[in-house]
Image (cartoon, helix red, strand yellow):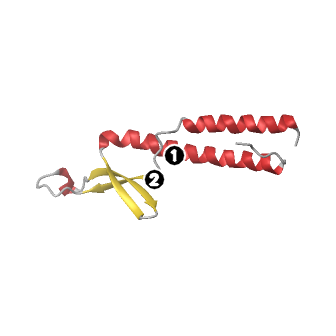
Amino acid sequence: MGDKKTESLKRKKQKTLDMLLLHGDMIRGSLVKTWKKCGRAGCRCESGEKHPHTYLSTSGKRGNTIVYVRPEQEAAFRRGVKAYRKAVSLLDEISRVNIEIIKGGVADEK
């Protein structure tokens, strides 16, 4: 692989790493919305109009975890989940660039 190509790939890698740093508020998981009855007498949910609830669902070494998300927190959680997905995409791009660099015989000294 030529030096120009190598330098171009290294610049692309650095730019992608810089973009990754912008997604520091990432949250791994999925937001799940459910509707439930509250059980209070006379509440509208008795007639079928249930209350919405949002949860963050994650899975890991200790199994699945569900965390209740208050309505005023939902937008922040949505941004965090979106940031995580973008970060995963950026990591995939870095991996592809690293493969190209290594296959071209150029190892990063870092």
Amino acid tagged 2? Gly
Q: Residue, x 54% and y 35% (percent of image)?
A: 22
Instruction: Tell me the residue at 88%/39% (across/down).
Output: 2
**Marks 2 and 1 in Cβ contact (< 8 Å):** yes
Q: Secondary structure at mark 2?
A: loop
**Which image quarter is the C terminus in?**
top right
For label 1, the SS is: helix
Q: Is residue 27 left or right of residue 101?
A: left
Distance (Cα) linking label 2 and label 1? 8 Å
Identify the residue at the far left of this view.
41
Instruction: Please state which amino acid type lies under the numbered disc 1.
Output: Tyr
Q: Earlier in the sequence, mark 2 or mark 1?
A: 2
The residue most toward the right is 2
Q: Quadrant of the N terminus?
A: top right
The disc placed on residue 29 is 2
Give residue 61's position: percent from left, percent from top: 46, 64
Q: Say which residue label 1 marks.
A: 84
Q: Residue at x 34, y 41 (%)?
A: 73
Q: Nearer the viewer, residue 21 or 65?
A: 21
Residue 13 in the image: x percent, y percent? 70, 39
Count residues near mark 1 (Cα–Cα under 10 Å), then give few for <14, some for 14-19, many for 20+.
many
Name which residue lies at 67% across and 34% down.
15
